Image: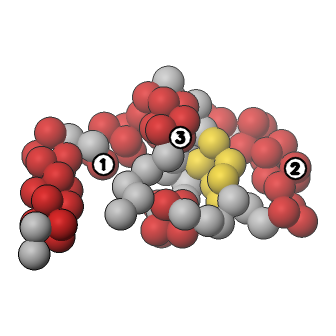
Amino acid sequence: MEEGHFAGIEIGACNIPMVARPIGCYLDRVKDVGQWGEVSSDENFSETIRNVIKNKNLYSPRNYYSKEYTLERCKEKWNSLIEEFTK
């Protein structure tokens, strides 16, 4: 159960938007693109980076991750993980 990439969370905490490849936890975050950053394929990666840098004020990754990792949500995720492994 991968909930997030630590580097992505750290970047978001600094309110810096990021560009990620569509793998791992970022597959689940595609629906939230535009809030924390963008997901891009290899073919468009550098162009997507340029666009994010040019429009960095349109993103609010700190706000996104603050809602995503509240104490209550983390508690729910841990309880779910514990339940999954103790069945």
Which residue carries the number 2 mark? Answer: 46
Q: Which residue is at the far bottom?
A: 87
Q: CA distance from mark 2 to mark 1?
A: 27 Å
Q: Residues within 10 Å of mark 3 (few under 14, many from 20)?
A: many
What residue appears at the point 17 percent right and 70 percent down from the top-left corner?
84
Which residue carries the number 1 mark? Answer: 68
Q: Of tags 3 and 2, which is closer to the observer? A: 3
Q: Amino acid at mark 1?
A: Glu
Which numbered disc, 3 or 2, marks the residue that appears first in the sequence?
Answer: 3
Q: Amino acid at mark 3?
A: Gly
Q: Which residue is at the far top?
A: 14
Q: Residues within 10 Å of mark 1 (few under 14, many from 20)?
A: some
What residue appears at the point 83 percent right and 55 percent down from the top-left corner?
45
What residue appears at the point 14 percent right and 59 percent down from the top-left corner?
82
Seen in the image, is 46 located left or right of residue 37?
right
What residue appears at the point 43 percent right and 50 percent down from the top-left corner?
4
Q: CA distance from mark 1 to mark 3?
A: 12 Å
Position in image of residue 29 (x %, y %):
48, 62
Which numbered disc, 1 or 3, marks the residue that appears first in the sequence?
Answer: 3
Question: Which residue is nearer to you in this view: 78 or 18?
Answer: 78
Seen in the image, is 25 located left or right of residue 73?
right
Q: Of tags 1 and 3, which is closer to the observer? A: 3
Position in image of residue 47 (x %, y %):
87, 52
